[in-house]
Image: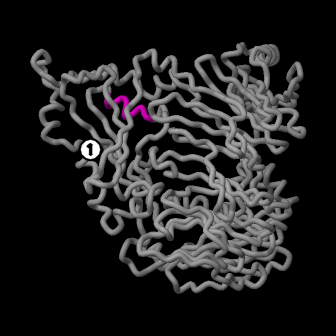
Amino acid sequence: MRNFILLLSLMLSSSLAFSQDSAESKTPIPNYRQAAKYSPTNLAKLVHSTSVRPNWLKNGNRFWYQYKTTEGSNYYIVDADKRTRSKLFDNDKMAKWLTEITKDPYDAQNLPRFDFKFVKNETAIRFRVTSTEEVDAIDDDKKNDSEQDSTSTKKKKKPKKEKKVYHFEYRLGSNGLTVIDNKKEDKKEWEKWANVAPDSSIVLFSKNYNLHWMDKENFLKAVKDEKDSTIVEHQWTTDGEENYSFGGGGRGENNETKEKNKDDRKGVRVTWSHDSKKFVFERSDSRHIKDLWVINSTSDKRPTLETYKYHMPGEDEFYKAELLIFDIPSKNINKVQLDTTKQQSISVYREPRKQSNANDDFQPSLLLSKKGKIYFNTISRDRKKLDICVADINTGEVKVLIEERFNTYIESRQLVLFNNESEILHWAERSGWAHYYLYDTEGNLKNQITNGSYHVENAIGVDEASRTLYFTAHGIPNNEDPYFEHVYRINLNGTGLKALNAGDYNTSTSMSDSNAFFVSNYSRVNTVPKSELRNSSGSVVMQLEEADLSQLMATGYQFPEPFKLKADDGITDIYGVMYKPFNFDETKSYPLLEYVYPGPQTESVNKSFSVRMDRLDRMAQVGFVVITLGNRGGHPDRSKWYHNYGYGNLRDYGLADKKYVA
């Protein structure tokens, strides 16, 4: 739990009382009205967009984005190849067209919330707008209009009403809107249970703990009406049972809903081969694991009970996982050849999703390999042994490619397969720092790619033609905050390391599928956020946006102050942020409040400007000096020594540095 912890008890015992004798006291009077000014509700009226979130398109290096300021929202489309940025549409014209068609008033600063879908080879957009006009509900039971009691004493039921929906199309650059229809967007209830093959030929689901399937024709019936009695389903497995099932997990269900929904179609998670002929399913046996319970004592009618399996620390029982290969044409099931007596977890590597597919409705989960191989990893229960493995999708035969062993817990990243599936990028902390290593697909190490006293975060792209890796990392400039993230490129032979968005800022980025361009959002807690477009050489192609903080600053807002001090060992650098009352008076004494979250996967210390800093700003305005800071054993984006400092002592490790810095 994140908690505000008062560390200086002697100071607080006197200071928190906020002496009523304000004339004599050196302690400030608490200012709750000032704190209330910076509530989330009030901040939402002062600060709007602070970063550009690009929606990459499929054709060319293009993307669109929305950006909101105190003047309203604007929508832009950027063509990086042509170095152009233009409005997706003219706000004044859009307001005019919407007003004329819907009869609801709009203006350029006050348009409805849009959810765009690009169509017609990305030359047009479609979106829906709900008007205030009420019309008869489309699904209303029309019988109510004519049915009347035989005694003629009962009145007709009024037809159900609903807001009228307009489904529009706008051809980019045109001079008007086209109404496609007035249908609401489908609820897509089938998404809760249907797992559709990449070629849409077959749909999988779980029912009564077993795997079932239906063909496309019957699935289309289910999309229209899930209760259609003519739907033909096929049962694939017969040995599924509770806690050893083929999908349809019961987490979140209580004793009442479990009985009510027992015969419903439920979801099943599988990973498909690219040709849609096979899929892989991880089946877990937890029948022997002891139960854990959650009682909902405030439910509507009577208390309900949720029961699920959970193994506690020190218990000998463990989840037994197996990988199954299903062949669709033959309906055969093979097992990946694993030792199920080992206490281990399994994770199948999947093909990464393209940025340009992020908003697609249909995104099947695909195997990393297109050539009949299943790449996966196994990690021991104590997380000290990690094996990168490959299995043949036809025989289930397994080969261990890479082994990682450590005396503390092992972190991992997505495996990268490239160069016609002949090479692998593997992320590991075997040197005490996180780096990428180049392997062939037989498991032979070719060379270490990145090297040095810094932390590589993630691979974000590989240019196979130039044999270049693009990645994010922390701590390469040794004179800046090591938590600041930047984008770099390096040759796969380990030469030519270059920063692509250097600067004393923290950045968040989004790279195009082509690796030719990326959007870089950058700021610190004490700077105005800005956004720009850069190319793969690191050159700025165009400035995109600068956050509008004018109304926030008009309230008297002041940026917090980053700081760096030593840890309790007197050696390790600790980074933090200090939040002061905006009317801070250095002649007075302020109680110190520390926001504590010891990790070990984060430290809850802001690095970029964000309105989500409001809880810290508000506490400071009451009359505190509030600080957040890291600690040894906290954030993983430094050395493995720093990250694993609290290994074996999660009770005590977190506060020593906090107390020392205070």
Report the residue at 75% width, 58% height from top: 364
Locate residue 523, reporting x and y percent. Answer: 52, 35
Report the residue at 63% width, 82% height from top: 400
Instruction: Tell me the residue that label 1 is attached to.
Output: 5
Locate residue 376, reporting x and y percent. Answer: 64, 73
Residue type at the position of mark 1:
Ile
Which quarter of the picture shows residue 423? bottom right
Of helix, strand and loop, which one carries label 1? strand
Find the magenta span and give its range. Answer: 613-620
* Side of 613 relative to 83 (left or right): left
In this rendering, the count of numbered labels is: 1
Task: Please say whether residue 470 is one of the residues in the magenta stretch.
Answer: no
Locate residue 243, reporting x and y percent. Answer: 55, 73
Colour scheme employed for the rendering of this structure: one colour
Most foreground residue, 191 or 484: 484
Most foreground residue, 468 or 107: 468
Most foreground residue, 434 or 384: 434
Locate residue 643, reporting x and y percent. Answer: 41, 60
